[in-house]
Image (tube, grey):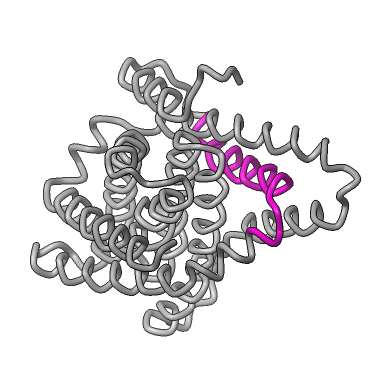
Amino acid sequence: MFPIATPALALFCGILMSLMGLKDERLSGLTSIMLQSSIVLMGFSMNLETVARVSSNAFWLTACSVFFTLSVGLLLGRLFGLDKKTAMLISSGTAICGGSAIAAVAPVIKAKSNQISFALVVVFTLNAVALIIFPKVGSILGMDQKSFGYWAAIAIHDTSSVVGAGAAYGKEALDVATTVKLSRALWIIPLTLVMSVFHRDKSNSASNRVKIPWFIFLYVAAIVFSYFTTQWQDSYTHVGWLGRRGLVLSLFFVGLNITVKDAKDAGFKSFALGILLWIAVSVVSYLGVSASGL
C-alpha cells in the first residue's frame, strides 16, 4: 500500500517468495478476484468522454492486432509441430487478455489440463518480463504517455501486466492502457462464440458454456455512474487510488503463482511460439501506433 511498492517490485517479490517456497496455495484463488475488483474501483476515477474517445480511436488497431496474432500464432504452431489446441490457447492469450482468454477458450475447444497449464505458464512468464521491460523500452524509444498506453494495451497479454506497465510509466499511460486493454478484452466474447460454432457438440454441460468476463461490464458501469454523480468526485479519486494499490497486491499474487517447475514442463516449443509471437505483436503494434499518430 506504500508508494515505494511499484508493480514491478510487487511481482518480483511474489516470484521470489514462490521460489523460496514461502506461499500459501489458498492465495492463488484471490488473484483473479483482487485484480478484477481493483479494475472496477479504478473505473470510478476514469472520465467517460475520455474512455469513449480512446476506445474508438483504438478499435481498428485492436481488431487488426487480434486477427494478426491469431493467424500468425496458429501458423507458427503448425511450423513448430505444436499440437493445435496448445497453439490456439497461446495465440488466444496473446491476442486478447492472457489467462482470461485461455480460461474462456479452453472449455470451448475441450483442451486438456496439461495444454491449459502449458499455455498459462508461457503467457504468465512473458507477462512478468513485459511488465519490467516495456516501460524501459518505451523510455528508450521516447514514447509519450498516451502512445505508450496504446502500445502496452495492444502488445502485452494479460490485464495485470498491461495496467502495471502503464502505472509504471505514468498516470495518463495508466488510464489509456486500462481503457484500451479492457475494450480489447471484450474480443473474448466473439472469439469464444465463433469457436463454439466450430467445436460444438450435443453436450449441454457447464464446461461447454462461454465464460464472459463480467467484471468488464462492471468497470464500464463504474465509469458511467461516476460521470453522472460528479458531486462525489473527491471520493471517487480515493476509490481510484485504492484500485491502483489493489493492482500492486494483485501482481504480488501473480508472482506467487509462477514456479520454475511449471516453466520447465511447458517445454521449449511452447515458449518459442510465445516469444516469437509476442515479439511480432510488439513490433507490429508499435508500428501501428506510430503510423496512426495515437
**Which quadrant would residue 2 be assigned to in this image?**
top right
Residue 88 screen position, x and y as percent: 29, 66
Vertical position of residue 228 compared to residue 79: above or below: above
Residue 79 screen position, x and y as percent: 8, 68
Instruction: Give the residue drawn at x 47%, y 55%.
Output: 100
Residue 197 screen position, x and y as percent: 43, 84
Which segment is the magenta one? Answer: 27-50
Question: Overall secondary structure of the magenta stretch?
Answer: helix
Vertical position of residue 62 compared to residue 190: above or below: above
Vertical position of residue 141 compared to residue 63: above or below: above
**Which is nearer the eye, 44 or 53?**
53
User: Where, quadrant-wise, is the C terminus in this rendering?
Assistant: bottom left
Residue 184 screen position, x and y as percent: 48, 63
Q: Residue 125: in sight, yes or no?
A: no
**Which quadrant would residue 81 be assigned to in this image?**
bottom left
Instruction: Give the residue drawn at x 48%, y 67%.
Output: 58
Determine if the magenta segment contains residue 216. no
User: Where, quadrant-wise, is the N terminus in this rendering?
Assistant: top right
The answer to whether residue 83 is left or right of residue 167 is left
The answer to whether residue 70 is left or right of residue 98 is left
Q: Residue 225: in sight, yes or no?
A: yes
Determine if the magenta segment contains residue 31. yes
All told, the count of numbered labels is 0
Of all residues, the one furthest to the right in this rendering is 231
**Which is nearer the eye, 66 or 147?**
147
Instruction: Give the residue drawn at x 45%, y 24%.
Output: 10
The answer to whether residue 165 is left or right of residue 67 is right
**Which quadrant would residue 183 be assigned to in this image?**
bottom right
